[in-house]
Image (cartoon, grey):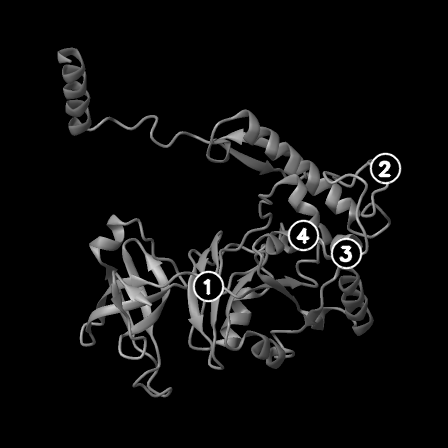
Amino acid sequence: MSHFGEEIDLAADLWGTVVAVQANFYQVQLDSKGYSSQEGYPLLLCTRRSRLKKIGQTVMVGDRVLVEEPNYTDGQGVIAEVLPRKTELKRPPVANADRVLLVFALEEPSLDVWQLSRFLIAAELTQLSPYLCLNKKDLIPPIEQQQWRSRLLEWGYDSIILSVAQNQGLEEIKQQLAGKITIIAGPSGVGKSSLINKLIPAVNLRVGKVSGKLQRGRHTTRHVELFELPTGGLLADSPGFNKPELECNPTQLVRCFPEARERLAMGQCQFSDCLHRDEPNCIVRGDWERYEHYLVFLEDAIARQEVLNRTPDAESNFKLKIKGSGERSYEPRLESKKYRRQSRRSRHQDLQTLYDEEDW
């Protein structure tokens, strides 16, 4: 590994993982070298070298970084190098994640198959392995639990059914998370923060109450942060959201359904650009349960692609709005700098440019 032309000795240098980012400060958890597990591994609040900013090197939660000038008394340091990332997500912004843990509730709120399907597709788009956790098993009878598990197996997903409130199923979750960077996601009010509190008691996250009127949880997570698991590994809690956007090319969508991937593995459609709707000799079209979900999500993807094709940089100018009724539409984003007063320096630069052009 090189460090601006110099060899880096991973055993000699001070390395760590960025566990939180706020403004231009980065909280780095140092590796275990030289520290006992009882002491805990030091956390340093770091800035980054100006040269990293000059070369456009960003620092994300999950990054492996080289720390210089550690000051253990004040808990400070400086990030001098960022290792290449294995994976990189934009939403939530996490580097080097290994898998996505989707948490849903079986009741309170009731499990919505359309919402669950949408989250699963969003997880598939990250190209990370999704792992499904169904909470609040104590609120439904065992036969319904088994029916849900069998149904999801037909979708192509194994699931663990647990009760955070009754401490059931937590050991299996710990085994799945050990030694990995995992992103936990799901709708608000399903018990994500409660689950993290049980897995990492020292975190003591705020737990949001479910809104009685809407049966939806209030958002309790404000930013992305990595929490160390006692059994090893890191857990990233992402802000709760109810309808993640599916940002993909229409032809890419079908590969996000395990049921469709299984059919495509057995053969191929007549047309290479088949969208699996009305095309002849399509092997994907059929009576599998989520085929209707595919058609609806496909219309969303096509509408988004049309907007992108019509408008330059449309992704930043338009946003998808989904109403409670399920009606979808694209609305223009506000131009953040449209009403900002031009700085005096900019005005002088513009005048100087005009003067130079006239002089030329």
Compared with 339, 19 (above or below) is below
**Left or right: 97, with 351 as reference point:** right
**Mark 1 or 2: the one toward you:** 2
Q: Are marks 3 and 2 in contact (CB under 8 Å)?
A: no
Q: Name the N-terminal-most of marks 4 and 1.
A: 1
Q: Tell me the tag on residue 265.
A: 3
In 3D space, how far apart are the residues under numbered discs 4 and 1 (Cα atoms)? Answer: 21 Å
Which residue position holds label 4?
A: 256
Q: Quadrant of residue 170?
A: bottom right
Q: Indicate the secondary structure of the residue bearing disc 1.
A: loop
Residue 20 position, x and y percent, is 36, 63
Compared with 200, 34 (above or below) is below
In 3D space, how far apart are the residues under numbered discs 4 and 3 (Cα atoms)? Answer: 14 Å
Q: Residue at x 14, y 15 (%)?
A: 355
Q: Indicate the secondary structure of the residue bearing disc 3.
A: helix
Q: Are marks 4 and 3 in contact (CB under 8 Å)?
A: no
Residue 221 position, x and y percent, is 46, 58
Q: Of 269 and 162, which appears nearest the observer? A: 269
Residue 102 visible in the current orientation: no
Q: Name the N-terminal-most of marks 1 and 3.
A: 1
Compared with 18, 92 (above or below) is above
Q: Indicate the secondary structure of the residue bearing disc 2.
A: loop
Q: Quadrant of the N terminus?
A: bottom left
Which residue position holds label 2?
A: 280
Residue 59 position, x and y percent, is 34, 57
Q: Are marks 1 and 2 in contact (CB under 8 Å)?
A: no
